[in-house]
Every structure is written in structure tokens, then in C-alpha cells.
């Protein structure tokens, strides 16, 4: 009797969906409900609940047949139209790159913009990227800056990094190394690896900030500790020439060896030329120091 009752309830729900023109009967009957929670979501979704519509779309997205995918898009669209941000992000991502729907970058941009206007940091960065690249929307550096800044104002480190990168370039006539420094610094202080490398370069060259070999070394070393090969190469050079740190050939070789092991060709050349200048014991000790430092992140 319990099974029969459950069957009747499911049938009534299916009829409700058909009457509301949300999914065709064929789609629904071929996608049986798996449990009570899905049944509850269908009931709520049929009443226009955006979260239930989104949850139901997620359920259908977990399946691989064509009809499930079509149902997922319909539910996502219904939820997104009601300004449910998660649905807007999901459908935008599907239109950007997926096998669920035919890629359509203009539709992706449309949904990212809708979500960005509702305050989604992820969407703000995504639509800024599209404005910067001129994909799905007309290239507009001012719109790109606006949306990156919206995300940056919420302490998003990726937005700060992208603003730093944008202000470092002169492509759009917006080059401003001081602003680049400020945004790279904000990201670097929050452990953004590439930002740490960029802030080191600005200190090294004196761009947007007073030149400082010591500060450049400090930031290269931070990135080197996190196994960035370019930073490890720069730390090796600093030790080799005594720039920003006391000259130390054994540690120079040790750092250059680590960078070379990750594909840095110049590091390999330098460390081979330096090896005859130190004893094996000195080099062994320096290698131990470097590896201990790297692993102590």
C-alpha cells in the first residue's frame, strides 16, 4: 500500500507539471523521481520557488541523457529569471563551456552581467574578463575596470591581481604603476602567488614604488618558498650577486638547482658555472637549508 500511495503522489505531481507547461510529459515520465526530496523539489518548483528550480536543475545535470540536460536548462532558466544568483552563474558557465548546451558566449555574458548586478563577486570578475577581452560583449576597458573594482572593494584577491595586471600595461592607455602596486600588494599580502612575483618586480625596477633591492628579494623569496621557479631563479641570482641579500654562492647554487629542476634553463647554466667555487660540504648544507625552507610553507 505504501508503494501504491507513493506512486499515486508521483503521478499527481507529474500531472501538475504538465498543466503548468514546465516540462513536457514525455520528459517527466522518462525521468522518474529518485527520492522524496526530489519529489518535494518538483512540488516547490511547480509553484515557482527559485531555489527548488535550481536544485531540480542540479539533479537533472547529474544525469547524462539528452532529455535530462534539456530539463536542467529549462529549470535553470526559470530560476535565473527570478534572479536566483546561483542559477545565473550556473547557466552562464554552461553557456561558456559545457556539453550540456551549445556554447554561446553572448548568453553567458548576459547571465554573468545579471548576476554581477546582484552583487556576485564571481560574476563581477567574469563579466570584467569578458569586457576586457571583448568576448560576448563589445570590448570596454571602463566597464572591465568598473566590475573588477566592484569585486576588489569586497577584498577579492583575484580582482586585485587583475587590476594590478591591467594597470601595469599600456594597452588601453590606463598604465599607472602606483595603482598596479597597490592592487598587487593587496593580493600579495593575501598569499596570491603571481602577485608576490609582480610586487617583487615592481620593487626591483622602482615602478610605482621606491626602488628597493631588499624588498624585491623579500617578495621573490616568498614566492620562491612556494615553489615558483621564476622566483627561485631570481633568488638564486640575488645570492649570486649579493643584491638585496648578502652574497652567498652555496645558497645561490642551491636555489638555481631547484629552479633548474622545474625547467628554468638559465638557472641550469648558472648553477653549473658556479659549482667549482664551493666545496661539496658547503653545497650539501645550502641544499638542506633551501629544501627545509621550501617545505616550511
Image (cartoon, rainbow, N blue to C red):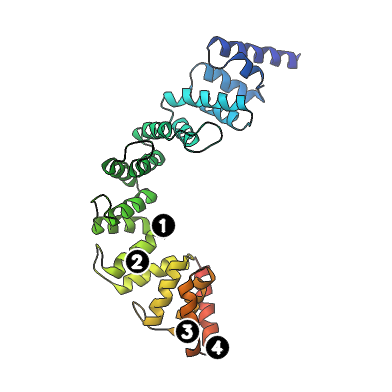
Q: Nearer the viewer, residue 270 or 191?
A: 270
Crowding near the residue tagged with mark 2, few <14, some 14–19, many ≥20 C-alpha atoms within 10 Å:
many
Camera-nearest label, 2 or 3: 3
- 128 displayed left or right of 24: left
Q: Nearer the viewer, residue 94 or 172?
A: 172
Circle nearer the N terminus (3, 1): 1
Q: Secondary structure at mark 2?
A: helix
Q: Is residue 109 above or below residue 164?
A: above
Real-space CA distance between mark 4 and mark 3, rounded to the nearest whole angstrom: 18 Å
Circle nearer the N terminus (1, 4): 1
Camera-nearest label, 3 or 1: 3
Q: Are marks 3 and 1 in contact (CB under 8 Å)?
A: no
Q: Residue furthest right?
A: 1
Crowding near the residue tagged with mark 4, few <14, some 14–19, many ≥20 C-alpha atoms within 10 Å:
few
Real-space CA distance between mark 2 and mark 1, rounded to the nearest whole angstrom: 13 Å
What residue sits 53% from the left and 37% below the top?
Answer: 98
Q: How many marks?
A: 4
Real-space CA distance between mark 1 and mark 4, rounded to the nearest whole angstrom: 36 Å
Q: Are marks 2 and 1 in contact (CB under 8 Å)?
A: no
Residue 192's tag is 1
Quadrant location of residue 236?
A: bottom left
Real-space CA distance between mark 2 and mark 3, rounded to the nearest whole angstrom: 26 Å
Residue 281's tag is 4
Circle nearer the N terminus (2, 1): 1
Identify residue for label 3: 273
User: x and y percent of residue 144 in the render?
Assistant: 31, 43
Residue 200's tag is 2
Amino acid at each position: 500500500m505504501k508503494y501504491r500511495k507513493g506512486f499515486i503522489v508521483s503521478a499527481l505531481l507529474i500531472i501538475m507539471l504538465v498543466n503548468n507547461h514546465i516540462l513536457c510529459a514525455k520528459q517527466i515520465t522518462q525521468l522518474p523521481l529518485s527520492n522524496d526530496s526530489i519529489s518535494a523539489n518538483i512540488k516547490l518548483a511547480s509553484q515557482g520557488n527559485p531555489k527548488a528550480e535550481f536544485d531540480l536543475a542540479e539533479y537533472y545535470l547529474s544525469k547524462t541523457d539528452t532529455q535530462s540536460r534539456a530539463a536542467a536548462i529549462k529549470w535553470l532558466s526559470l530560476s535565473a529569471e527570478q534572479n536566483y544568483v546561483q542559477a545565473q552563474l550556473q547557466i552562464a558557465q554552461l553557456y561558456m563551456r559545457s556539453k550540456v548546451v551549445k556554447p554561446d558566449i553572448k548568453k553567458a555574458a548576459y547571465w554573468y552581467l545579471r548576476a554581477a548586478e546582484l552583487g556576485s563577486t564571481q560574476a563581477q570578475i567574469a563579466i570584467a574578463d569578458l569586457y576586457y577581452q571583448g568576448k560576448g560583449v563589445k570590448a570596454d576597458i571602463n566597464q572591465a575596470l568598473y566590475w573588477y573594482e566592484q569585486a576588489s572593494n569586497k577584498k577579492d584577491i583575484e580582482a586585485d591581481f587583475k587590476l594590478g595586471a591591467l594597470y601595469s600595461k599600456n594597452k588601453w592607455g590606463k598604465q599607472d604603476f602606483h595603482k598596479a602596486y597597490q592592487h598587487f600588494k593587496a593580493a600579495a599580502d593575501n598569499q596570491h602567488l603571481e602577485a608576490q612575483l609582480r610586487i617583487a618586480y615592481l620593487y626591483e625596477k622602482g615602478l610605482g614604488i621606491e626602488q628597493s633591492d631588499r624588498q624585491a628579494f623579500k617578495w621573490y623569496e616568498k614566492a620562491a618558498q612556494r615553489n615558483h621557479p621564476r622566483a627561485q631563479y631570481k633568488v638564486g641570482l640575488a645570492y649570486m650577486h649579493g643584491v638585496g641579500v648578502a652574497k652567498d654562492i652555496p645558497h645561490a647554487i642551491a636555489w638555481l638547482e631547484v629552479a633548474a629542476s622545474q625547467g628554468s634553463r638559465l638557472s641550469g647554466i648558472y648553477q653549473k658555472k658556479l659549482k667549482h667555487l664551493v666545496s661539496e660540504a658547503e653545497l650539501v648544507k645550502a641544499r638542506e637549508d633551501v629544501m627545509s625552507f621550501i617545505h616550511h610553507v
